[in-house]
Image (cartoon, rainbow, N blue to C red):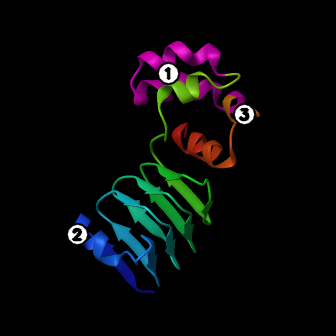
Amino acid sequence: MKTTTINTHAELESLLDEYGNLIVAGNLVATISISVQGSIKAVGSIESGGSIKSVGSIESGGYIKAEYILSLIFEIKCEKMITSKMPFYRNYYSEMPGMEKFAEIIQEKCWDDIREALMGERDYILNLPCWHPIIRTHIENFLK
């Protein structure tokens, strides 16, 4: 399968169609963050050296791997999502129903320390009914 590699923002811009969509026929590998005003679609997998952000949908025929993945319309389709950081800001997580008891940890610690402090609460946090499935997947990856 063909791999499209992106190393610069100019390369990224050159691949966008007139609507701001990034569509590739094989795998997509970027050493930079990917941010588009349209959608992102790859027949194969998508990897980014930073984050992946799209105003539209993000679709992959394989996995998607990035620091974090964010579709503003919450439409992400893939076989597997692999992330290392959380999208959104600390207040988002500390103010969710059931997360109030962790607010101080979330507000005052760095992300690595938050991960360490919440590992023992992983099952409780993942089972809270407030999470959108995409956010739950981010939390699963974050608390590994």
Q: Is residue 110 magenta?
A: yes
- Res. 46 mark: none
Query: Which residue is the site of mark 3?
Result: 130
Which residue is tagged 2? 10
Dominant secondary structure (helix, strand or loop) of the stretch shown in magenta = helix
Q: Which residue is mark 1?
A: 106
Q: Amino acid at mark 1?
A: Ile
Q: Amino acid at mark 3?
A: Cys
Q: Residue at x 63, y 49 (%)?
A: 134
In the image, is residue 98 above or below residue 61? above
Which numbered disc, 2 or 3, marks the residue closer to the eye? 2
Q: Is residue 42 above or below residue 135?
A: below
Classify 10 Å Cα crowding around label 2: few (below 14), some (14-19), many (20 and above): few
Q: In the rendered image of this protein, does residue 68 appear above or below residue 18?
A: above
Residue mark closest to the camera, 3 vs 1 = 3
Q: Spatial distance from mark 3 to mark 1, Cα to Cα?
A: 17 Å
C-alpha separation, residue under disc 2 versus residue under disc 3: 39 Å
Give whichever of discs 1 and 2 has the lower sequence position.
Answer: 2
Describe the element under mark 3 as helix, strand or loop.
loop
In front of the other: 36 or 90: 36
Query: Which residues lie in the magenta part?
Result: 99-124
> Which image quadrant for residue 71?
bottom right
Which x, y percent locates residue 47? 42, 64
